[in-house]
Image (cartoon, grey):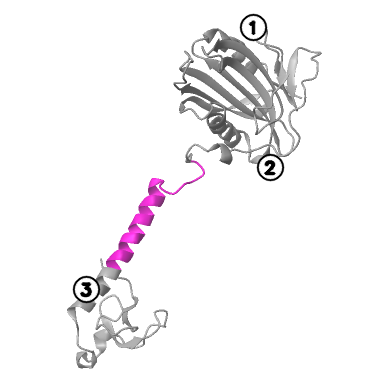
Amino acid sequence: MSAPPGWYPDPAGALGRYRFWDGSGWSSVTSDRPDAAPPGQQATGADPRTLPPRRPWGWWLAGLAAVVAVVVLIVLAVRVVGGGVDSPDMPGPEPSQQSCPRATSSPSTPAPPSTDGRVRSGSLSYPQLPPPFEPPIADSRTPFGYDVQSQQAPVERSADGRTNWVAWALIARLLAGDGFYGPEPGAEVVARCVVALFYDNHEIDRTDTRREAITVDGHEAYLIESHLRFDIPGIQTKGETMIVVVVDVGKDGEAGLFYGTIPDTSPQFLAPIRNALAGLEVG
């Protein structure tokens, strides 16, 4: 492929000088500026005797510069077409704890006494889960949510007593100002940050089994359901189902979150959490 017209290092080898290539031949004049205007006279119409003696290594350098330019353009084109450059629809690497959003105002408040059998956070609520799920409590372990309320059902405890494993349902408010911009991107942020924050830095393998836009009580929402695999010392459970739903509750800059995990060793908790999901209300 021929190099495009332009000023290139003088193939005759003159230091600091540039000679114009018109696409098929070299000009008879040189310049000390690579951004100079193209010369009016082209080498193809000039007397070749006016050109300085040609040195083979100078021609080789000019050709190499042209080849490098073409290769760079091709590599950039391949990266863009092939997705090598991050784009909004291409998920990036799992975030670290430092890169996950953090709630920037007051922490969660104590759960108010339920008068209608529902667990509430902001405008979102779900029917309270029955025993063996414990009563709802204010939960401070979810740093990216506000007014976090959760219910847990014990599953197992490690032999040394240091690790408790539970089935878990959680509800919270999310704010756009913290990085949650709409149901789908908000659900993806939550799913990634759950993996980064909730497992004490153990390696987690996440496989999404369901991703879709849904409607919750007439409001737009997005659901991500995943299976997580891990090997945590002292815990018999080696995997669990994760459910994340982010709901547009109709307030500017705010969304609602419903989150649940069901250990593989306790499938009896899957139906109650799915019932809570089906019973989500906004208002």
Is residue 179 toward the left or the right of residue 30 in the image? right
Residue on which disc 2 sits: 177
Residue 282, image x, y percentages: 73, 24
Whether 71 is among the magenta residues is yes
Residue 279, image x, y percentages: 67, 16
Is residue 270 toward the left or the right of residue 239 in the image? right
Residue 119, image x, y percentages: 73, 18
Task: Name which residue type carries label 2.
Answer: Gly
Q: What kind of secondary structure does the magenta stretch mostly adopt?
A: helix
Is residue 27 toward the left or the right of residue 130 in the image? left
Q: Residue at x 19, y 84 (%)?
A: 54
Q: Which residues are magenta?
A: 66-89
Tell me the quadrant of the picture where the N terminus can be found.
bottom left
Residue on which disc 3 sits: 60
Q: Secondary structure at mark 2?
A: helix
Q: Nearer the viewer, mark 2 or mark 1?
A: 1
Mark 1 or mark 3: which comes first in sequence?
Answer: 3
Q: Nearer the viewer, mark 1 or mark 3?
A: 1
Q: CA distance from mark 3 to mark 2?
A: 56 Å
Residue on which disc 1 sits: 132
